[in-house]
Image (spheres, grey):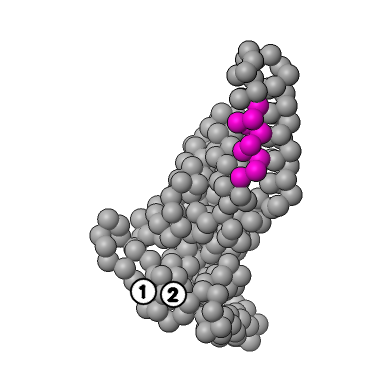
Amino acid sequence: MMGKSHFVISTGVTLSAMSLLGYEITIPAIAVAAVSSLLPDIDEPNSLLVRTALPESLLRLLQVALIGAGIYLYFAGIAEPPWNIALALLVGSVSFLPGRRLRHLFMLLIALALFAFAEAYDPWNYIAACMLVVASVVPHRGLTHTLYAVAGWGALLYFVSLEMESGDSLWIAGGVSYALHLLADSLTQRGITPLPPLPFKIRMKLMSTGSKKGSAVENVFMLLTLALVVYVFILRPQTM
């Protein structure tokens, strides 16, 4: 499914189910459900989550910075000729990488910055940095599309919720929304491999991303999700 569909369906179904089961719908829970609906695709540089966090303007800024770094290395006298030329060309040429590779590079740079300068946020800085490193090197629908990732993300949110006194709503919102993303991807032609290295795949072949049939299926599920949200949060009698 496309990012927009994941966002609407996973977030809407998660929050609706939580409300029906009597869980408190808090602002942090809404935010976590929304992020978790897109988080499995952090390993795809062109996904909605990554493109939103790292827009084209930031990529252009990174390219300019790399070219500037190349010019600086040429004139700074750090290396003797011809090594200064080679070093400048090496750094400057990175700016011409495709957008996907540039986003991976940006993710690695952010991870290095978290490792080096965000000690005040220990251990979450290291957790976020490790996630960025893993996401930048693993293939799409790899580790992030497994039950291990669901369990790890849910456990992480559980311990965060203990510190925030937010009850169960935080980790349930994140875990369910993340799992619904994987369930949606299991409907596609490619499917997912939930328990690697076991070769078992969940692939229902109900739709193909980008095809007319796939778009129609996505639209149907989004309409059903919106109908569920309207019923739960607007039409359903609210108990005091």
Q: Nearer the viewer, residue 48 or 56?
A: 56
Q: Residue furthest left?
A: 198
In the image, is residue 111 above or below residue 195?
above
Label 2 sits on residue? 188
Residue beneath the point at 66% across and 56% down = 52
Q: Nearer the viewer, residue 124 or 51?
A: 51
Amino acid type of disc 1?
Arg
User: Label 1's element?
Assistant: loop
Pointer 2 with pointer 1, Cβ within 8 A: yes
Amino acid type of disc 2?
Thr
Sequence-first disc among 2 and 1: 2
Label of residue 203 in the image: 1
Crowding at dot 1, Cα within 10 Å, few <14 / some 14-19 / many 20+, comes out as: some
Crowding at dot 2, Cα within 10 Å, few <14 / some 14-19 / many 20+, comes out as: some
Residue beneath the point at 60% across and 19% down = 83
Residue beneath the point at 57% across and 42% down = 105
Mark 2 and mark 1: Cα distance apart in space: 6 Å
Give the magenta range: 87-97
Label of residue 160 in the image: none
